Image: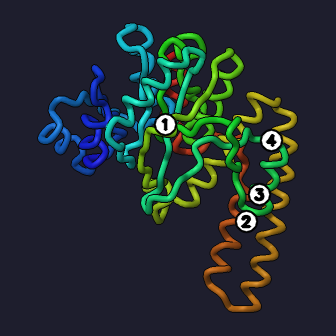
Amino acid sequence: MRACLRTLPDACRGLRWRATVIDNVSGDGSLEMLAAEFPEVAVLANRVRLGFGANHNQVLHRLVAAGSARHALVLNDDTELAPEAVTRMVAALDRRPALGAVVPTVLDGQGRPSATRLAWPTARSWLRADRRDITELADLNGWLQGACLALRVAALRQVGGFDERFFLFYEDVDLSRRLVEAGWGLGVCPEATVVHHGHATVLRPGLVETTLRQGRRSRHLYFTKHHGARRATVLSAAGRTILAARAVKTAVAAARGHDPAARELARRRWALARSNPHRPLPQEAAQLTRAQKLK
């Protein structure tokens, strides 16, 4: 987060801007660091841990209600912005009034380009992911990833912010889809660059299995919302059957080769096959409580 915030002034050169950090019950000294090194940055400190969409909505809803900004930038803390990156994204939105959102050129930690627009999820991509661990492919007509996403506030006023039913993953797919359905365009600003170190939190040891379960849970919610509960249920059953078969095949190979790593992979696949994505996960409890209070 420190590295990310240090890049903001140059990235926003020529703009009037304000940064807000949402501390999601970090407990790692982040609040103290912010107060000491970035006193100009506003901070919202959660009392309970919320998901990606609910966290960002705390700021986005206020901006929409106040009408105090033309654009909003959703930004992960594991990013570093190049000089004038935000300035250029704002300029792209201003040049093309039909765009509701844009993303920059994204590089990984080794300077390699990453996909910023991905193909819309389909039944085929669902089953391909469960069969071969291949997620959505790059597509210039697809949805925009939310790691660094510039949004037009007027578009948010029309379609709303993130759907808070998605604790993590697919909330950016859903928002992209709602923007398109409302008539807004999605774009890429290639001259703006950001380095995204990528999944620094969700793939750390001890969280991988939870992350995988969350991805399948959010995928189920997305298909239920946009393609119907029946299709989501059928695809879920088919995907879990595929995962169970892969788990058995991996377990047999692990037993023959006395391979501990393969045994662990078989166990993980079996756990995913048994996990019912229709049921909320433990980390969603505070989120569901918040959603009920908002109603």
Reading the image, the residue beneath label 3 is 130
Give the residue type at disc 2.
Trp
Comparing marks 1 and 4, which lies closer to the viewer?
A: 4
Mark pair 4, 3: CA separation: 13 Å
Would you say the residues marked 3 and 1 are in contact, meaning their CB atoms lie under 8 Å apart? Answer: no
Residue 177, horizontal then vertical, whole percent: 68, 27
Would you say the residues marked 2 and 3 are in contact, meaning their CB atoms lie under 8 Å apart? Answer: no
Give the residue type at disc 4.
Thr
**Farthest residue, direction left:** 36
Mark pair 3, 1: CA separation: 24 Å
Relative to 103, 66 lies left or right: left
Would you say the residues marked 1 and 4 are in contact, meaning their CB atoms lie under 8 Å apart? Answer: no
Q: Secondary structure at mark 1?
A: helix
Name the disc covering residue 122, or none: 4
Reading the image, the residue beneath label 2 is 270
Seen at 74% across and 28% down, the residue is 225
Name the disc covering residue 52, or none: 1
Q: Secondary structure at mark 2?
A: helix
Residue 98, horizontal then vertical, whole percent: 60, 16
Mark pair 2, 1: CA separation: 27 Å
